[in-house]
Amino acid sequence: MQQAIIRAERVEKYYAQPSENRIQVISPTDLSIVPGEIVALLGPSGSGKSTLLRMLTGLSVPSGGQVYWHEKPIGQTEINVSIVFQSFALFPWLTVLENVEAPLQARGMEPAKRRKRAMKMLDTVGLDGFQHAYPKELSGGMRQRVGFARALVVEPEVLFMDEPFSALDVLTAENLRSELLELWQKKTMPTQAIFIVTHNIEEAVLLADRIIVLGRNPGHVRTDFRVALQHPRDRKAAAFTQLVDYIYKVLTQPEAQPPELPRTAGGKRVRDQRLMSYQMLPHARPGGIAGLLELMVDHGGKADIYRLADDLAFEVDDLLPIVDAASLLGFLTVTEGDATLTPNGTEYANAEILRQKEIFREAALQHVLLLRQIMRALEAKSDGSVPEEFFHDMLDEQFSEEETLRQLETAINWGRYAELFDFDAQRHRFILAHVAEPAVETHE
Amino acid sequence: MKMLPGSFSNLRTRGEMVIPRTLARSQAVRRSWPFLLDLIVASIGLAAFYGVVQIARLWLGRAEPQVTLSLEPRALPLYALYSIVRMFLAYLLSLAFAIGYGYVAAYSRRMEALMIAALDILQSIPVLSFLPGVMLAMVALFPSRQLGLELGAIVLIFTGQVWNMAFSFYSSLKSLPRELTEASAIYGYSRWQRLFQLELPFAAIGLIWNSMVSVAGGWFFLMACEMFVLGSRDFRLPGLGSYLQTAASEGNTTAILWGLFTMVLIIVATDQLLWRPIIAWSDRFKFEQVESARHVRSPLLAILQQSRFVKRMRHVTLSPLMDKLYQREAKRGPTHVTLDDGDQRSPSALAQIVLGLVIFAAVGYAAIQALHLLHSIDRKEFGLVLGGAGMTLLRVIASLFLATLWTVPVGVAIGSHPRLARIAQPLAQIAASVPATALFPVILLLLLRSGGGMNTAAILLMLLGTQWYVLFNVIAGATAIPNDLKEVSRLFHFGTVQRWKTIILPGIFPYLLTGLITASGGAWNASIIAEYFRLKGKTMTAFGLGEQISAATDAGNFAVLLLATIVMALMVVTINRLVWRPLFRLAESKYRLGA
């Protein structure tokens, strides 16, 4: 058993609230990166993948637990890692060469030696001739190559990548992926391990020797397994598709065993977010939900989520929230990676727009606590309007500030679509729908 | 034949690549006159050196009790040089301080709130009310009277210029893109490397635009300083401002014309030789990922960039210096990679407590002394100050109203018709850069001859000084109205009234507001000179807060001076909070175009 290069021991991340609550972003997690493997970290949005990456690289300090670099605490030793960023993170006012030289400059290397190393690295990534160009003259793929060159020029022991290909078009991403594999397999770089964070399941199966799947609320490891496929890996091969399917199952399956939550210093249990009052509304719009259901009717009412994603060229992050929302509202049931329309869902998909709104309204009131509460509050008031801040404060107890705003936004969208209420954006108030409508004359 | 830079060697294979415009042109220049360019740069250097010698001779010379000004046109270049040098030094000081202040405010969690609140207040305090105090203090401090006055002028200009630059740097630092800071951290940038390779370049464009505004404002204050006379004591400095004032005093029209001509010449030269090259150079700091269509071109910049001399200088001095700095930092050991929340570097608690106590004691002492001083004011004087405040407020409102009245139609016209803009904008820029204070003696002279009063003159001066802010902002607002809105109005045949009501006025509202806020601050400041002016040995006044301040200065009544300054600062800050802020919030929420 090789010694791990980086080892995280019960690292967790939380934000303390003024009240006794803690918003747990990542529950205590163990993770280790050993030499000679490519590790992929997969997970839906909100599972804390990027936070975990930042804790492993030392950019962010864990709220609890410790990260070790060759068995020494990470804060006390010099570590040798690089990150390739999603949006390339190049300095627009430096040329390609200057961007790649900068980390060497930071290490105090002499100009001549720097230049030689940087030029060699640019050659390796195929950018020879572009050294005096500025980033804004380059395409996305070329910019990411500069990102790679910069990351590799310091000869890092572990190369971290934060969704490196998601800002690129499909073909360029394919191209870069295979070039990365080539560099890795030919051992052209002294890097001993690669850690890639992604939300693209196929990408993970294509590249990784080991896949870690995260769940959320709070972020935790759901499964961690080896990928034994030989390179070059064929997307159409049975073993490949089986693996992808399996991962989809894991992602869409509700938790069999919820992760254990830590206790606060005073010995009180941290509130389990899944048991708290508000379920987290998936970030989906009514239009998207309607679209998905109509598509499924075409497929005969039953679809494999993996195949659906493939057909739509959707990523996990795009499709799962819509699937979650549809199942929350009772229009779908999800079992083992397959989605089936319920009778309600079929009716919704086949109805015309006014009836759709009615069905949505009933489902929303039945299944979404937040919307029920908003309606009750509005009906209780004589003027039929309630300030937004009231609900903001309640959600704040349970969610981070950013998530609270998104929850409110989703609730407002759904409420407006269902004609439950309207929202005055200027005065930040919910207004009961029939109050907003002008009086209608009844005709005999 | 020189080697083309690497990016061109691929032209044959990469036909679709974008060729940077500046490079193409400078290729032509470079091939033709290498030596001539070096010569030009060298002569610029020589001229600068001569200027420094002249300045030193003036400043360190023994002071005369009374400054004698020659009205000969021959003396003008020298006077212009003196004025320019004062501006330049004040600007450098402001820039250094602004970067320091902004840096500390952005990175020190504890100091941040305090420093930004202080910025807000300091920006609102009328700079000119400090003129007497600063001058007297400086003269007392320095044996060579001339040096003291010069430093006083510089300090005063500094106080007027530094705050908006500090705020610009601060807000640039706060809006640094996350991934860039993470990249700097993970690749081990030292603090210096981060400053020079990330923070300064990112903030460059904001700093440059704010510098332009600050320098323009600085001229305003400089002219006032150069004309400054306190009772029987003459604090005037030889320069353009005092030249124009003397010329107006003696009614020497030729001298006035020469003076104005020199002023305009300096403005145009600054624009062409300083600002345009800098703006053209700052293009590389734009944080957009796509080449934008418009570029400011500057032949001077091309010359400097291609000059071998400049390149050698940079190669020999700047680059090795930076490298040595980075090497030294690298030897220091591994830099803190963490970016996180939580005060990692907070100084010891004891040091902070001691510092807090010292500041508290100092502020407390000053406050008590001030209260003592204010105590000596009787009710009548108090009433005068308050009454004056009311009058000046009316004048400020009047000048803002007049400014809006003419700038909105003109601004919208210029903004909507690009061809008109091309002619009008440079003209407006030149007109705007001429400091109103330099023109004031001339205007007053004309008004007196035609029988107008000081009241009109005061409003006119306030208008002149501040209308340009409003105009430029309105032009920017009119150009920002998206074309599709204009097309909708044409499609549905909107009448003029409807078009203005639904599209134009709401569209320019945020910009108009920004312009008015700046203009309002400028108007209050201007009132100090506008309401109390000395011409031909007589003192012309119009009742108002500015007049109270200047009169108190003249009489040496420091109690009233303090009270009036406080009242003015309070009024500006209160109007800021009560009027401008809510309007600004409205502009941001309801009237903002785009997401």
Image (tube, coloured by chain):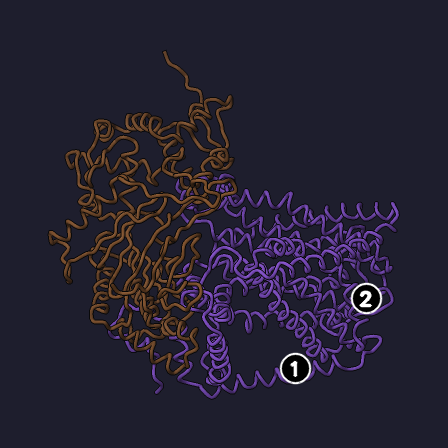
Chain colours: A brown, B purple
Give residue B518's quadrant in the image. bottom right
Tag 2 and tag 1, C-beta contact below 8 Å: no
Quarter of the rendering occupied by the C terminus of chain A: top left
The quarter of the displayed image where residue A228 is located? bottom left
- Number of numbered callouts drawn: 2
Along the line of sight, the residue nearer the viewer: A300 or A230: A230
Q: Does any portion of residue B303 appear in the rendered image?
A: no
Position of B521 compared to B499: left or right? right
Disc number placed over residue B150 in the picture, else none: none
Q: CA distance from mark 2 to mark 1?
A: 27 Å
In this image, A306 relative to B172: left or right?
left
Q: Name the residue furthest top.
A: A444
Pick whichever, A362 or B594, lies toward us: A362
Chain of the residue under the numbered disc 1 shown in the image? B
- Which residue position is annotated with label 2? B229
User: Which of the chains bears the disc numbered 2?
Assistant: B
| Residue B550 picture location, percent across and down | 80, 58
| Residues packed near mark 1 inside 10 Å, few (<14), some (14 to 19) or many (20 plus) | some
Q: Is residue B578 above or below residue B118?
A: above
Residue B138: percent from left, percent from top: 78, 70
The image quadrant that residue A77 belongs to is: bottom left
- The kind of residue tagged 2 is Val
Query: Mark 1 — residue?
Result: B51
Seen at 28% across and 47% down, the residue is: A222
Which residue appears at 19% of the width and 40% of the height?
A336
Nearer-the-camera pick, A247 or B371: A247
Q: Residue B290 appears at what percent x and percent y? A: 37, 62
The amino acid on which the numbered mark 1 sits, given as a three-letter code, is Gly
Is residue B71 or residue A109 the one in the foreground?
A109
